[in-house]
Amino acid sequence: MIALIGVFLLIQAIPSLAQNNSSFLFSRSWDTGDPANLAFGVLDLLLVTVFSSVFALVIAMPVSLGIALFLTQYAPRNLARPFAYLVDLLAAVPSIIYGLWGAYVLAPALEPISTWLNENLGWIPVFAEGNTSLVIGQTIFTAGIVLAVMVLPIITAITREVFDRTPPMQIEGALALGATKWEVVRTTVLPFGRAGYVSASMLGLGRALGETIAVMIILASTSDVFGWSLFDGGDTIASKIARAAPEFNDPRGAGAYIAAGLVLFVLTFVVNAIARSIVAGRKEYR
């Protein structure tokens, strides 16, 4: 089925790619207004997609690791079970709710933080002034935090399961040698669960790369190129396709967006394949 999806996207994209007057992989402009004169490139969309997703992963990974360690190693059982359910319930919240929360609640709350980072750390490219207003908050900074919350239950759930499977004999042996609780975690739990934690993070990255509605609601669409700042607006591949969906009345114009979708398809497939290979390598090692 995966192969059939890829073949379908490729067949639908080829006619538009053949008529494209720009470099599809390296151009940062997107103009499909005139189907007879297509000029579109996916580079800018790809950069925004990867940048926002990696930023979300940087936030979500340490938080997920801390929650998983707390639930499996420190929390009492009568507290760990309901708390784990609570974290898992985050995955059940619809994307559009996250988008509305990010745009109308989180963005105004983050405005003072964004302004402080821009004024005091603006000499660092990622905190430099972006191409959209900080007051409105429709930036990659806001979108990345929302994405981090969305991928948090995925990473936490898998990491928690892996940590729970740490062989009890290893933990008991470390305790018998006089190790503290943190030393047990550092010398037995973390080494055992490292591959599972990394693969869970990769799966979370795949989820963030393909998120559509929440990102579309939060990010301000702009014609300016992406400048590697957290305070830029723009479009991810998925949000760009979603914004233009009502205009898919011409096969050539729609084919340009299908070509972008093909890039996203390949990217998420590669990310998930890497995660699976990490898990398989860990099983072979064991």
Image (spheres, helix red, strand yellow):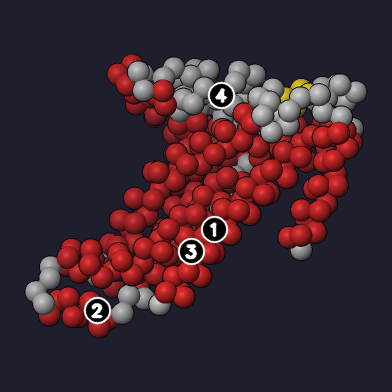
Q: Say which residue appears at 28% left-offset and 68% top-offset.
A: 189
Say which quarter of the image contains residue 66.
Answer: bottom left
Real-space Cα separation, disc 2 to disc 3, in angstroms: 23 Å
Q: How many marks?
A: 4
The quarter of the picture where residue 177 lies is: bottom left
Mark 4 Cα shell of 10 Å, populated few (<14), some (14-19), many (≥20): many
Residue 7 position, x and y percent, is 81, 53
Drawn side of residue 76 relative to residue 277, left or right: left
**Residue underneath mark 1:** 274
For disc 2, the marked residue is 170
User: Is 254 rendered above or below residue 177?
Assistant: above
In the picture, which quadrant includes the N terminus?
A: bottom right
The numbered mark, 2 or 3, whose residue comes first in the sequence reads 2
**Amino acid residing under circle 2:** Gln
Pinpoint residue 217: horizontal percent, then vertical percent: 60, 33
User: Do tag 3 and tag 1 residues touch (Cβ < 8 Å)?
Assistant: yes
Dot 4 corresponds to which residue? 226
